[in-house]
Amino acid sequence: MTLTTRLARLALIAGIGLLGACKPASEATRATVVNADASASQSDDYRESSPGKPGGTLRLSTSSDTTTLDLHSISHGNTQWLGRILFDCLVYQDEQGNITPWLAKSWEISPDGKTYTFHLRDDVTYSDGEKFNARALQLNLEHMRDPKTKSPLAAAYIAPYVDGRIIDEYTFEAHLREPYSPFLDVLAQSYLSMLSPRQIVEAPKSIAEHPIGTGPFVLESYTRDQGLNFVKRKGYHWAPEVTGHQGEAYLDRLEVSIVPEAMIRFSSLESGQSDFTVDAPAQNAKAIRQNPDLHIRSLIRKGNPFRSLQFNTEKFPFQDVVVRRAVTKAVDRDGIAWIAGFGEYQPKSDFLASNTRFYDPAYKDVLKYDVAEANRLLDSAGWEQRDAEGYRVKNGRRLAAELLTYETGAYPSSIAVAIQADLKKVGFQLTIDIAPLPQILEKRYAGNFQVIAAGYWHTNTPDGLYILYHSKSISTPSFIGQNIGSFRDEPLDVALSAARQTTDPVELQKLYSIAQQRLTENVPAAPVYESHVLVAYRNAVKGLIFDTSHNTPIFTTVWLDQEAK
């Protein structure tokens, strides 16, 4: 396998964010108002309010294929909702981010934080008849970190896991190298679903196209780049208690079509050819809201927001924190959010999603859009002089950098061009290198760039800050890390490392507040807007709730009102 191929498999970027823009102030204000209304979580978003009616087929569209259904081996965004169709997890988060039972009934953590003893349900089976038990849990943890799995995400999330011991059939003891307080949080995510132990041992390659799980639906067929069909799992009765659902799923079938074209997803929904899209086109959101037959919801993913720019702090001119701060403040986030989300996305200028546990709003405006302040900062850094084209110069060198990005439908080059225009206003020359994705990945992990379009990293815990910004997350010849800008800050490292060592909520709030403060002061990247989940569906769709880790739909509770079709 070539380095390019390996990096492509390991890349945690379904898209590498870019983004920046300009629009009239009145539109910016209007966008914020619409988005705030759309993104507000409701009390029944995460718990079934009343039983539904069984039967029917839900026709669903999505924009892209995951290319594999081995959830341990990918980081694709669709994993978040697909995982809840086919699989279950060891534990579940509640609305406040607390860990609650699922396949594990209960657990104990040793005083040193390095041993977790899980007591498992004894009534859970896979659709192939295998039991879910301690052996199944052990095999899943080993599969996540097996080099053959080439896991870009699950392996990173359980990195402190060393080994485990089967105490009895339904009791498992997990041993960690060091205390790791996010351990239970990450085990609640779809990426760490419990796959069939028989498949893992006997036919691991078959997981990619014919996975077997304990979930509420069973895969009937999968045609790559076309679609998937699922049927109800008979006898399913172990949904997480906090979802309020008991027993089997209501739907008989789920038919998923892969439809890359946004307009076709919208028109199919509007015409009644489909019932639901998990990738509602933001450009059609207004039309969806105006259609009495349709509904749209926009929720924020936990973890890290979108970053339009990731600075290489070892390359000119971004080794200077003042320049990083000035560039970040010169980018019009309202404009970026408008271009990317047509008023559906909330602008963002700090480093942790606002719905993530231990988020501290004290720093939300530190890096807000401020052209006057950006100019003042650049002047203070010695870039007062300008050349004939209006760009700043110092010691005969122009203040300039190249943005490394690539063209996608989600993040078109027009957004990079908008950032370019924003920075020109403060005398910073930004050129744009639109390159093929394999080339970008090689440069990304080799650190061969000045600034790169960085995208988002989803996780249900603030420990995502460690993964992106701790100095131990910098890539080495033997390790591919996500701190691609080689950012180093000792106080940040101390806070994030200490947060992994404690489970005390008061101490965690203090440590993560310090981390958020250090990031807004040192600016390793330019956050631009929250990462949104945008779904739309017809009136006939009832009972929709959202997963608490990902804010993506759960289809176990969905039912169809035939009278509304």
Image (spheres, rainbow, N blue to C red):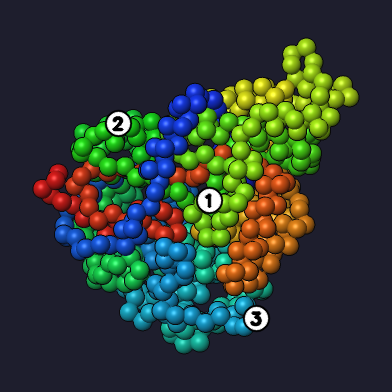
**Residue 146 visible here:** no
Three-letter code for the amino acid on which mark 1 is drawn: Ala
Give the crowd class for mark 3: few <14, some 14-19, many >=20 residues within 10 Å: few
* Dot 2 or dot 3, earlier in sequence: 3
234 vs 338, nearest the viewer: 338
- Residue appearing at x 67%, y 47% in the figure: 520
Q: Which residue is mark 1?
A: 353
Q: Which element type, helix, strand or loop, lies under badge 1?
A: loop
The answer to whether 155 appears left or right of 341 in the picture is right
Give the crowd class for mark 2: few <14, some 14-19, many >=20 residues within 10 Å: few
Q: Which element type, helix, strand or loop, lies under badge 3?
A: loop
Q: Which residue is mark 3?
A: 112
Three-letter code for the amino acid on which mark 2 is drawn: Ala
Q: Which residue is mark 2?
A: 287
Distance between the Cα atoms at labels 1 and 3? 30 Å
Residue 524: image x %, image y %? 69, 44
